[in-house]
């Protein structure tokens, strides 16, 4: 009975949220899309194939003039990454600044600094310095300041603008590097975390072809130029996103319509395929066997600070999270 009541409560919360957002979605995208979003949001985990296809078609139709323009781009892929700096910029963002990072985020940031190769340099983007690197359109700044663009959405815009302008590697602030830094992320014309599996990732629009939180490439790479133009155009015309991971739908439109972009995306081999496994077991007791299982195929691990993080188990054992913290603080392998 308790479980039934909890599920009913969660359903009510989803209904309330859907009703609250429906008018905005209807105003921006029409009744059909608003209804699709509302229905899909009722039953977790959502993102049914029908929903994905509907959103993908809407975004693809909207971006058709842009994709037609980029089809005519005489872009020739190169082998080696080219950037605007002497050392490859590794872009990371924590809006409030490093001194305001939660413990887990600081752990990831400290580890990243420890493992970066000599040819790379971490550049932390904050609210105080982002304008030193990119000049965003005024309408984007205004929509951000009025709350129409969230910090998460602004982060999407910043990552593609920075990569387009300067090249380098964008990595989210909650990615933990467990071993030797993969140099492909700071050497190739285009590279991204990839775990392509249409069945396993059926609820994801990209089906694991890429992850927006770890992407790298050369300055003026056609992928990042396209994504920047798509974001700028979208936020000129709309006051909200059609989906939380709208970057995936922009890149899907390019992937399906611009051959050179499809070829570059498909040239990236599967890598870091268990990227989402570590955060699920941070509360487990630490053991060498657990670490080996997590790191056999994966060096980059997407974590989150938005969960309960324990340093000891109920039996007083050191958790994996505590072990990671101690390893970073002592500059030692995990």
Image (cartoon, rainbow, N blue to C red):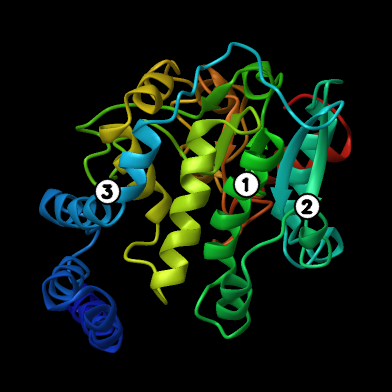
| Residue 319 in sight here | no
Query: How far from the left and from the top, in percent, is residue 145?
Result: 63, 81
Q: Is residue 134 visible?
A: yes
Residue 172, disc:
1
Expressed as whole percent of the image width and height from the top left, the position of residue 149 reads: 52, 73
Disc 2 crowd rating (10 Å Cα; few below 14, some 14-19, many 20+) is few
Q: Return the x and y of residue 51 as percentages of the image width and height.
A: 16, 57
Q: Nearer the viewer, mark 2 or mark 3?
A: 3
Numbered disc 2: secondary structure:
loop
Q: What is the CA distance from the residue labelled 1 to the residue labelled 3? A: 30 Å
Q: Residue at x 69, y 23 (%)?
A: 186
In x, y percent, where is residue 36? Answer: 14, 68
Above or below residue 233? Residue 279 is above
What label sits on residue 133 in the rendered view?
Answer: 2
Disc 1 residue crowd, few under 14, some 14–19, many 20+, Cα 10 Å: many
Q: Is residue 299 left or right of residue 179?
A: left
Residue located at (21% from left, 81% from top): 26
In the image: residue 189, left or right of residue 123: left
The quadrant in which the C terminus is found is: top right
Question: Which of the numbered marks, if any, corresponds to residue 117?
Answer: none
């Amino acid at each position: 009975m308790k479980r039934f009541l909890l599920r009913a409560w969660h359903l009510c919360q989803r209904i309330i949220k859907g009703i609250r957002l429906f008018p905005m979605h209807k105003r921006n995208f029409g009744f059909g899309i608003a209804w699709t979003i509302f229905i899909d949001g009722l039953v977790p985990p959502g993102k049914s194939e029908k929903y994905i296809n509907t959103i993908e078609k809407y975004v693809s139709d909207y971006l058709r003039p842009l994709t037609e323009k980029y089809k005519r781009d005489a872009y020739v892929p190169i082998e080696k990454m080219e950037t605007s700096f002497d050392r490859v910029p590794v872009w990371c963002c924590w809006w409030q600044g490093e001194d305001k990072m939660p413990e887990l985020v600081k752990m990831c940031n400290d580890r990243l600094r420890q493992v970066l190769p000599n040819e790379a340099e971490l550049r932390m983007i904050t609210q105080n310095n982002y304008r030193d690197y990119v000049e965003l359109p005024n309408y984007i700044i205004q929509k951000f300041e009025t709350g129409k663009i969230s910090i998460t959405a602004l982060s999407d815009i910043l990552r593609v603008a920075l990569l387009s302008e300067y090249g380098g590697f964008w990595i989210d602030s909650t990615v933990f590097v467990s071993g030797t830094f993969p140099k492909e992320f700071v050497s190739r014309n285009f590279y991204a975390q990839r775990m392509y599996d249409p069945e396993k990732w059926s609820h994801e629009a990209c089906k694991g072809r890429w992850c927006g939180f770890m992407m790298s490439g050369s300055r003026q790479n056609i992928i990042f130029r396209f994504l920047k133009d798509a974001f700028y155009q979208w936020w000129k015309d709309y006051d909200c996103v059609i989906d939380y991971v709208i970057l995936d739908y922009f890149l899907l439109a390019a992937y399906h319509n611009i051959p050179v972009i499809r070829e570059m995306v498909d040239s990236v081999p599967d890598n870091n395929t268990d990227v989402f496994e570590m955060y699920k077991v941070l509360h487990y007791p630490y053991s060498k066997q657990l670490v080996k299982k997590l790191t056999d195929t994966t060096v980059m691990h997407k974590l989150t600070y938005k969960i309960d993080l324990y340093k000891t188990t109920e039996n007083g054992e050191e958790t994996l999270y505590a072990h990671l913290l101690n390893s970073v603080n002592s500059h030692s392998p995990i």
